[in-house]
Amino acid sequence: MDGRMSTVRELFVEVAEPAAGLLAEPRVAEEWDKPSALAEMSVRGLAGHLASQVFFVPAMLAQPAPTEERIGLHEYYARSSWIGSDLDTPFNRGIRTLSEKEAGDDPAALAARVAECVQELRTTLPGEPDRSVRRSSWGPWSIGLDDFVASRILELVVHSDDLAYSVGVATPEFPAPAVELVTDILTRIAIRRHGAVDVLRALSRAERAPTTISAL
């Protein structure tokens, strides 16, 4: 992680707090069992997936530090086979199943758990030493803690918008540095998927813009 992102852990908490507030919105509970804006995922599942991005951080820190090679944030996304994958892949089906399980049956309880976890991370996360983290589903490599936290910021920002849109409430306002971080990551992924020319045209020339430059 470069110097521009030295406060990424504090930024994570600043993003996680409004995400937790969104989960506590009455409309989330009202729409709990209805379809979300994401194909094949209910509002409940989407809420559970959003919450899991917060829970993921202490869960990773509770594991022993890996010994595998550490790669950078953008290489992590370059190696992520789930990007652009079909909804019916075992990985995506597993995400939906785990998200429903994480959400449980009580929207208020889920929101309270997330809010409590965010407050704990506000105290503990900034003081964590630099270390690598790794999921068993990845290849034989790891990423740095700050890069992992940055990836969770992306998930929180993107899925907060998904959830807000799904239940008809305003998307939370996130700090400008978080939005800049997320758009930087998404732009780099989009360039890998669609090529630099299409991304440049989509950002600068509406008359020549491609149909999509979706990163994910």
Image: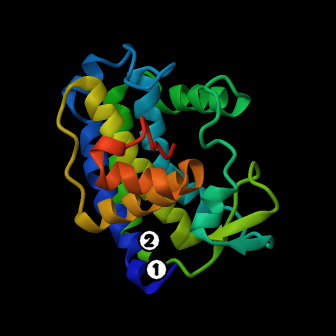
Q: Residue at x 72, y 28 (%)?
A: 90
How crowded pointer 2 is (Cα within 10 Å; few <14, some 14-19, many 20+) is rated as: few
Amino acid under disc 1: Gly
Q: Residue at x 76, y 65 (%)?
A: 141
User: How many numbered callouts?
Assistant: 2
Residue 181 disc label: none
Residue 124 disc label: 2
Q: Residue at x 69, y 45 (%)?
A: 81
Question: Dots 2 and 1: beta carbons under 8 Å?
Answer: yes
Give the residue pinned by disc 1: 127
Amino acid under disc 2: Thr
How crowded pointer 1 is (Cα within 10 Å; few <14, some 14-19, many 20+) is rated as: few
Q: Residue furthest bottom?
A: 3
Above or below: residue 20 compared with residue 43: below
Image coordinates of residue 200 in percent, x first then y, are 40, 57
Image coordinates of residue 159 in percent, x first then y, are 39, 41
> Does residue 152 appear anywhere in the picture?
no
> Does residue 150 appear anywhere in the picture?
yes
Cα distance between the residues tagged 2 and 1: 6 Å
